[in-house]
Image (tube, helix red, strand yellow):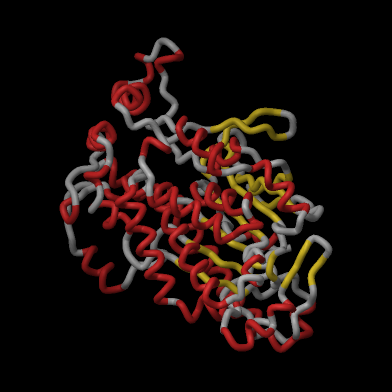
């Protein structure tokens, strides 16, 4: 069973930064434990779960265990707070020589020297260990059961096609949700597999592309954050009536801090700084733009009379956005020394140097730093951010202990349908709506 109004959870990409998402979920689970009775906590708070890149892995892990939300969050938290790079990519000297060192050599000396196919590395790092981790952490064979039992309404993960240039949303739904198509965006109903997660999390240049079947042909796919112009759209298409959106980086820079940083002249940017900036554009910018667009349309809808609202396909969407309050590249700079030596040597070759205040290239490293000191720091930051917005979280979920608990019986949905919510408890429009729906 899942709560109504149907809540969508949107988890964005960001490599190792996705530890922040787990910290947010853990903090929310703890608030929920205090606000609800044990029986009420058996209900899944997120009927629609959508993820991109590393967020797709977190999303799938939650969806597979939709019948035990709190324990699923704790399992995820234990994994992230005890992470090592070797669980995601080969970090030993031999592995780095076979992938990263050869890749950089090809980049600097030209592909002409690679006369044999086996001498042509496909990416900076070899993420073969991640496939083994997914087999243990994400039992996707449980998804059909979760959908059939009404524990889950829909799960979606996204990837980008290197062949067609289109952005794909692969989804499984309890209802017969027809696929949608927009400019350069395609939705595909399917049985989700580990290969979809590997494709969604294949950071460009860093991890190899993954092959997926579409319309009877095999295509190569990479990170779902690439060409993702509407990150919130899949959740709404799949029926979400309100959204919890968890970012993996600050969506805006404080004005004073931006002015101070603009006065710094550190010299010409190196390759690591340029690559980190490019990754931030891929992972962060589209989400910020989509949220801004939703809020703007929501404000416009609030000005329309009821007669005009009835004639528009757009609808107000309640949304809560939680994103880091600190710069994660600065946080990564404090933990560069925890990376395995072969990885430090490899990254030094592209300009990741120093540590702490003297670090350069921390932005790039922030996506690859799958080491416990860094992931724990991200989770701690997330829990502090949720604590700072405790009242907003409680209002969003209607967990205000008095009237909220009294209305719990109205808010349970299952495979056979959902009971309607009493009119006086329906939420007012929040800050978002999808421009392109339906």
Q: Residue at x 23, y 63 (%)?
A: 261
Residue 217 lies in quadrant: top right
Residue 151 lies in quadrant: bottom right
- Residue 105 seen from this side: no
Query: Looking at the image, which residue sits at the far right?
Result: 416
Q: Residue at x 56, y 41 (%)?
A: 197
How far from the left and from the top, in percent, is residue 296? 56, 74
Query: Looking at the image, which residue sits at the far top?
Result: 115
How far from the left and from the top, in percent, is residue 293? 56, 68
Does residue 31 appear to the left or right of 234 in the view shown? left
Does residue 111 appear to the left or right of 184 in the view shown? left
- Residue 158 seen from this side: yes
Q: Residue at x 23, y 53 (%)?
A: 334
How far from the left and from the top, in percent, is residue 117? 46, 14
Which corner quadrant holds the N terminus?
bottom right
Does residue 112 appear to the left or right of 289 in the view shown? left
How far from the left and from the top, in percent, is residue 281? 42, 53
**Nearer to me, 119 or 278:** 119
Does residue 203 appear to the left or right of 140 in the view shown? left
As displayed, is residue 436 above or below residue 419? Answer: above
**Nearer to me, 290 or 25:** 25
> How many numbered circles are shown?
0
As displayed, is residue 40 above or below residue 391? Answer: above
Q: Residue at x 46, y 58 (%)?
A: 21
Which corner quadrant holds the C terminus?
bottom right
């Amino acid at each position: 069973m899942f709560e109504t109004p149907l809540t969508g959870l949107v988890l964005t990409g960001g490599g190792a930064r996705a530890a922040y998402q787990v910290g947010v979920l853990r903090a929310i689970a703890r608030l929920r434990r205090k606000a609800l009775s044990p029986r009420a906590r058996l209900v899944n708070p997120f009927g629609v779960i959508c993820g991109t890149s590393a967020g797709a892995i977190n999303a799938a892990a939650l969806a597979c265990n939709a019948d035990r939300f709190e324990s699923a969050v704790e399992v995820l938290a234990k994994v992230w707070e005890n992470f090592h790079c070797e669980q995601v990519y080969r970090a030993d000297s031999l592995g780095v020589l076979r992938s990263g060192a050869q890749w950089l050599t090809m980049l600097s000396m030209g592909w002409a020297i690679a006369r044999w196919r086996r001498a042509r590395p496909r990416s900076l790092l070899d993420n073969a260990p991640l496939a083994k981790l997914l087999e243990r952490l994400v039992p996707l064979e449980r998804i059909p059961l979760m959908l059939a039992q009404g524990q889950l309404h829909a799960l979606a993960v996204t990837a980008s096609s290197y062949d067609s240039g289109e952005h794909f949303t692969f989804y499984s739904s309890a209802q017969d949700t027809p696929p949608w198509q927009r400019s350069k965006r395609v939705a595909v109903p399917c049985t989700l597999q580990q290969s979809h997660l590997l494709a969604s999390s294949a950071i460009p240049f860093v991890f190899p592309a993954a092959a997926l079947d579409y319309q009877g042909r095999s295509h190569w796919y990479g990170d779902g954050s690439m060409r993702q112009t509407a990150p919130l759209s899949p959740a709404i298409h799949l029926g979400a009536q309100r959204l919890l959106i968890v970012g993996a980086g600050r969506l805006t820079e404080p004005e004073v801090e931006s002015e101070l940083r603009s006065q710094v002249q550190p010299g010409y940017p190196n390759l690591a700084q340029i690559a980190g900036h490019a990754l931030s554009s891929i992972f962060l910018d589209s989400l910020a733009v989509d949220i801004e667009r939703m809020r703007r349309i929501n404000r416009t809808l609030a000005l329309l009379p009821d007669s005009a609202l009835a004639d528009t396909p757009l609808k107000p969407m309640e949304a809560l956005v939680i994103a880091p309050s600190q710069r994660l590249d600065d946080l990564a700079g404090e933990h560069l020394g925890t990376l395995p030596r072969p990885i430090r040597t490899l990254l030094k070759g592209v300009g990741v140097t120093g540590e702490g205040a003297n670090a350069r290239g921390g932005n790039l490293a922030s996506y690859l730093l799958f080491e416990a000191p860094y992931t724990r720091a991200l989770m701690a930051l997330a829990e502090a951010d949720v604590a700072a917005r405790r009242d907003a979280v409680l209002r969003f979920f209607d967990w205000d202990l008095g009237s909220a608990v009294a209305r719990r019986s109205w808010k349970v949905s299952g495979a056979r349908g959902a009971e309607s919510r009493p009119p006086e408890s329906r939420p007012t429009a929040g800050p978002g709506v999808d421009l392109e729906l339906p």
